[in-house]
Image: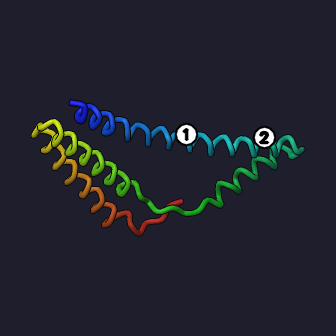
């Protein structure tokens, strides 16, 4: 019984912890940006000059590859594997079927990334 409870906690809590870590990182980056703006204003720069600096920072972003389908595919595969583990532990065959469907769907998303977005660069 404890194994089933631990498997459920890990399969639900793991993705939640990852989302919380990502949100905290984005918040930290936004705080750093606003801190730089505040420091520039305190150093005596005019608001127009600070606005130009912000536009320059936004233009100099490094082009990133489009990896949305790729990342989503791996997330779906991870969730389907957690469903597989839960299904094996508690002995429910419906979890095994959902796991197989999720695995196929995740592989399909990775295939879409490979065929469409792999060579596309965005800013």
Q: Looking at the image, is mark 1 or mark 2 earlier in the sequence?
A: 1
Disc tally is: 2
Q: Quadrant of residue 119?
A: bottom left
Q: Describe residue 69's horizontal placement relative to residue 4 as left or right.
A: right
Nearer to me, 25 or 52: 25
**Residue 53 percent location from the top left of the image:** 75, 52
Q: Outermost residue toward the left? A: 93
Q: Residue at x 38, y 63 (%)?
A: 117
Residue named by callout 2:
38
Q: Residue at x 75, y 46 (%)?
A: 36
Nearer to me, 114 or 83: 83
Nearer to me, 95 or 54: 95
**Label 1 Cα neighbours within 10 Å, binned few <14 / some 14-19 / many ≥20:** few
Q: Quadrant of the C terminus?
A: bottom right
Tag shown at residue 24: 1
Tag shown at residue 72: none
Q: Judge whether 38 appears above or below 116 on screen.
A: above
Nearer to me, 52 or 3: 3
Q: Quadrant of residue 46?
A: top right
Q: Outermost residue toward the right? A: 44
Q: Quadrant of the N terminus?
A: top left
Q: Describe residue 103's horizontal placement relative to residue 118 as left or right.
A: left
Q: Disc 1 versus disc 2: distance between alpha carbons? A: 21 Å
Q: Outermost residue toward the bottom? A: 119
**Residue 99 percent location from the top left of the image:** 19, 46
**Residue 3 percent location from the top left of the image:** 24, 36
């Amino acid at each position: 019984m404890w194994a089933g409870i631990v498997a459920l906690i890990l399969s639900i809590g793991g993705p939640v912890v990852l989302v919380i870590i990502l949100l905290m990182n984005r918040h930290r980056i936004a705080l750093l940006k606003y801190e730089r703006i505040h420091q520039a204003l305190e150093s005596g720069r005019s608001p127009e000059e600070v606005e130009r600096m912000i536009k320059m920072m936004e233009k100099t972003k490094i082009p990133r590859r489009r990896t949305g389908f790729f990342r989503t595919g791996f997330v779906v595969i991870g969730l389907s594997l957690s469903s597989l583990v839960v299904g094996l532990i508690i002995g429910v065959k419906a979890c095994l079927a959902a796991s197989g469907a999720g695995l196929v769907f995740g592989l399909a998303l990775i295939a879409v990334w490979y065929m469409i977005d792999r060579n596309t660069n965005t800013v």
